[in-house]
Amino acid sequence: MERGAIDVADLSGPFDLQATVESGQSYLWNRADGRTYEDLHAHGGDEWYETVVSPIPDLTDERVPLRVRQVGGVRDGTLEWEASTDAVPLLTHLLRLDDDLDAIRDATPDLPLLERAYDRYEGMRLVRDPAFPCLVSFICSAQMRVARIHGMQRRLRETYGEAVDLDGETYRAFPRPARLAARSESELRDLSLGYRAPYVRRTAEMVASGEADPREAVGLPYEEARESLTRFVGVGDKVADCVALFSLGFLEAVPLDTWITTTIEEYYPDCDRGSYAETSRAIRERFGDEYAGYAQTYVFYHLRAGGE
DNA sequence: TAGATACCTTATAG
DNA sequence: ACTATAAGGTATC
C-alpha cells in the first residue's frame, strides 16, 4: 500500500472533499462510517471516503482501491490518501483538483443566488466520474432522492462488483458493463431499481456489445454530445446532461431537473423557453456559457440543503 | 411535434 | 395505523 498527502494550499482555489463527494454528482464513493449522504454534515468533516477505480488512462483491467480524507480547512487543509498505487493523478482527475476554482468563480456572473451558493459551499468542485458508472447512476436517479440513488449504486457494487483488497479491507468496484448486461431484469429489480432495472440492463448491453460507448461523446460539440448520449435506454436530456457534466467534462452542461426548473421559475422566469433545448440555452447564457454547470451544481446543493 | 400517462419503490406528511 | 404524495425523468402513445 502507498500513502501520501496533497496540500490543499497548493491547488488553484479551495477544495471541500465532503461537499464535492456528497453533493449528488458522484455515487462512486462510500463513507467509511457507513452513513449515507442523507446525513449531510453529520460528522466532523474528516471522514474517509473509499472507492475502487481504473487507472488513468483506462486501458487495462487493473483495479485500484483508494481512500481519501480531508483534514483541516478548505484552503489550508490536507488530503490524506491510501491506495494500491500513487493516487495523486487519480485524485486530481476524479475530483478535478486541476480546476482553477477561483478563476471559475470569477468568470461566473454576479447573481445573488450564485453568490450565496458559492459562499456556502466554498471549495466544492465538480467531479470526473468514470463514464459507465456515472451513466448507470443517473439512469437510476429518475424520481429518486440522492440517498436512495446512492443506496442503489452501493448495492450494485456489493452484489455484482469485483472484490479488491487494500490493507486487509475488501472493497468492490462498480461492475463492468458485461457483468450487468448478464443480469436479468428481475435480478436488478431485487436491488430496488424498480422500473429502472430494464433501462440499466439494456444500456449495459449496448456498452458491453460495443454498440455504443458514452465516451464517444467526448470531443463533440456540447449539444451534439447531449443528443448522442440519449441513445442509451433510460437516458433523456436531463440524464444526458448529468453524464456530460459529471463524467465527460462538459462544464457548460446544466441538467434541468426539478430543483433547477423551480429555480428558473422563481429567479429567472425569462429563461423558461418551453422546451428543454431552448431553456437550456437561456440558463447557460445566464449562468455564464463556459462554467454554467459549475453554477448549477452549487445551486442544486444549496437549494436541496434548504437554502434560498 | 407537443401533451398526457404509466412506471417501481420507499420515506415522509397528513 | 393508514393513505396520499413526491422523489435530480423517461418511454410510449
Image: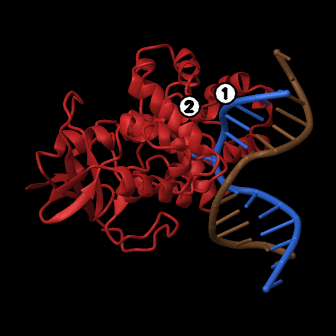
Chain colours: A red, B brown, C blue
Residue to which mark 1 is pinned? A280
The secondary structure type at the circle numbered 1 is: helix
Question: Front-most of A163 and A50?
Answer: A163
Numbered mark located on residue A297 in the image: none
Is A179 rendered above or below residue A284?
below
In the image, taking residue A130 as reference, residue A153 lies left or right, namely right
Figure quadrant of the C terminus of chain A: bottom right
Circle 2 chain: A
Query: Between residues A225 and A9, which one lies in front from this camera angle?
Result: A225
The disc, 2 or 1, on the residue closer to the chain's N-terminal end is: 2
Q: CB of mark 2 within 8 Å of CB of mark 1?
A: yes
* Front-most of residues A276 and A19: A276
Please, what is the three-letter code of the amino acid marked with disc 2?
Asp
Q: In the rendering, at what x and y percent does residue A251 appear?
A: 47, 30
Quadrant in which residue A264 is drawn: top right
Secondary-structure class at tag 2: helix
| Left or right: B8 as drawn, with respect to A100 | right
* Residue A77 in view in this figure: no
Q: Residues within 10 Å of mark 1 (few under 14, many from 20)?
A: many
**B5 on left or right of A266:** right
Q: Using the image, tell me which numbered label, if any, was put on residue A241.
A: 2
Residue A275 appears in the figure: yes
Q: Position of residue A55 (x, y in %)?
A: 20, 37
Q: In the rendered image, which quarter contains the N terminus of chain A? A: bottom left
x, y percent for residue A125: 40, 45
Q: What's the residue at 45%, 20% (across, down)?
A: A212
| Left or right side of A84 for A50 | right
User: How far is the residue under mark 2 from the one under mark 1?
Assistant: 10 Å
Q: Residues within 10 Å of mark 2 (few under 14, many from 20)?
A: many
Q: Position of residue A269 (x, y in %)?
A: 80, 36
Q: Which chain is indicated by disc 1?
A: A
